[in-house]
Image (tube, rainbow, N blue to C red):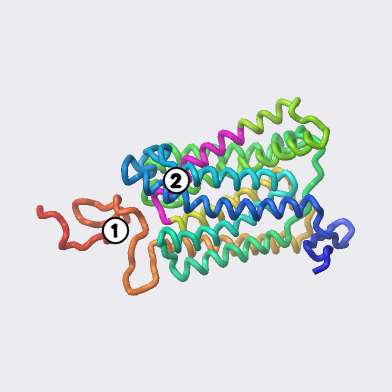
């Protein structure tokens, strides 16, 4: 394949085609590497969480015994390596291109979960994963070119415009409502609660990661951005958001099937990140209506995949339907799960 065919983007102003820039290729390679590490880390961390939960208080009910489990730390280090690669990718390529490439982590995570954790995914769940990948690919192929940024102060100006300030305020408010009200009541039975917090906060962390990555990239090229207070504000936001994501992602992994957590988290996180990028960096201002409509079709495809994954999370292939949630949710009085799913035989109940 010719070099000019490696990646093709449309220059809306001139109507001509341009090959993928060297920076975009670097970002693409780092993003793919990141997906490999992150996909594997889901499985290693899950193994660590299960091992820690067997001898201490489970993360799903507020325990932190996993911090003393070496296997969990191996998974954490693997994830950190993946996040560093992802961080570097955002410094070179636009968020609307980098973020959807996390689809590869779904495939890796699902395959490893099947082999190592013996977690099964219903055939419609497989279809849901395929729809997520197709939708993400559609968005990637029609992603806009990144705008030129010459100073972290430019990113700060974009982040403090009314539209993005409104989005950030809305995200923080919804996250606080989920944490303070819905997680205590529904965190153990509704997968979207934990993942909702991770995804909402994650969309803000990506914007800050991109700003920090641009600052470091410019600094290494000779234009010192560390002298600006905005750089350190973005760094503080990154740390706060990542710690919040880690906490609630651990709870989601400990409570629900990894093969379901990984793709749903990916879809929500990707969708909200693209939305945040469109608002903050005004990506759609540099695209024609056809490209925007095509991206929206990709978005709808992703939502369809999410729906299938969510609706089939308690299903397995075969004559028997089993719940994938941890058996700790059994109601000791009637033997039914919190959503009315029979989790054990009725003749095994205690005598009254």
Q: Nearer the viewer, residue 267 or 78?
A: 78
Mark 1 or mark 2: whose residue is earlier in sequence: 2
Q: Nearer the viewer, residue 167 or 316?
A: 316
Q: Nearer the viewer, residue 197 or 296?
A: 197
Q: Residue furthest left?
A: 352
The span shown in magenta is 237-257
Residue 316 is labelled as none
Name the image quarter holding the N terminus: bottom right
Q: Quadrant of residue 294?
A: bottom right
Do the numbered discs 1 and 2 sit on residues whose CB atoms are within 8 Å? no
As displayed, is residue 290 above or below residue 51? below
On the question of residue 278 being in view, the answer is no
Q: What is the spatial separation of the Cα atoms under label 1 and label 2, in whole angstroms?
A: 34 Å
Q: Residue at x 56, y 67 (%)?
A: 130
Horizontal relation, residue 72 to residue 52: left or right: right
Where does residue 287 sit, x and y in percent of width and height? 78, 56
Instruction: Please give the residue where the numbered disc 1 appears in the rendered image.
Output: 340
Where does residue 212 sit, x and y in percent of width and height? 69, 36
Q: Nearer the viewer, residue 80 or 144?
A: 80
Q: Residue furthest right?
A: 14
Tally of numbered tags: 2
Instruction: Please give the residue where the numbered disc 2 appears in the rendered image.
Output: 71
As displayed, is residue 332 above or below residue 219? below
Q: Residue at x 71, y 25 (%)?
A: 229
């Amino acid at each position: 394949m010719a070099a000019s065919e490696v990646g093709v983007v449309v220059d809306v102003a001139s109507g001509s085609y341009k090959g993928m820039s060297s920076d975009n290729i670097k970002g693409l390679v780092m993003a793919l590497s990141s997906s490999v590490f992150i996909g594997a880390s889901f499985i290693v961390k899950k193994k660590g969480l299960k091992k820690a939960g067997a001898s201490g208080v489970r993360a799903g009910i507020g325990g932190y015994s996993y911090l003393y489990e070496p296997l969990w730390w191996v998974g954490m280090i693997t994830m950190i390596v993946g996040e560093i690669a992802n961080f570097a990718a955002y410094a070179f390529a636009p968020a609307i291109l980098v973020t959807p490439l996390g689809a590869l982590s779904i495939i890796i995570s699902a395959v490893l979960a099947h082999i190592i954790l013996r977690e099964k995914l219903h055939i419609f769940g497989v279809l849901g994963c395929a729809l997520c990948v197709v939708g993400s690919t559609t968005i990637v192929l029609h992603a806009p070119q990144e705008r030129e940024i010459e100073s972290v102060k430019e990113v700060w100006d974009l982040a403090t415009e009314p539209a993005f300030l409104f989005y950030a305020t809305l995200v923080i408010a919804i996250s606080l409502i989920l944490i303070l009200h819905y997680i205590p009541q529904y965190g153990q039975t509704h997968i979207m609660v934990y993942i909702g917090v991770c995804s909402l906060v994650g969309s803000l962390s990506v914007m800050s990661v991109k700003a920090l990555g641009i600052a470091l990239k410019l600094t290494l090229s000779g234009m010192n951005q560390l002298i600006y207070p905005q750089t350190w504000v973005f760094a503080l936001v990154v740390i706060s958001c990542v710690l919040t994501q880690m906490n609630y992602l651990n709870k989601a992994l400990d409570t629900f099937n990894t093969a379901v957590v990984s793709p749903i988290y990916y879809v929500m996180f990707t969708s909200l990140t693209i939305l945040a990028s469109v608002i903050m960096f005004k990506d759609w201002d540099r695209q024609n209506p056809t490209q925007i409509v095509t991206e929206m079709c990709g978005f709808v495809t992703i939502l369809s995949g999410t729906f299938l994954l969510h609706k089939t999370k308690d299903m397995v292939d075969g004559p028997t339907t089993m719940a994938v949630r941890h058996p700790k949710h059994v109601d000791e009085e009637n033997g039914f799960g919190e959503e009315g799913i029979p989790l054990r035989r009725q003749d095994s109940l205690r005598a009254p």
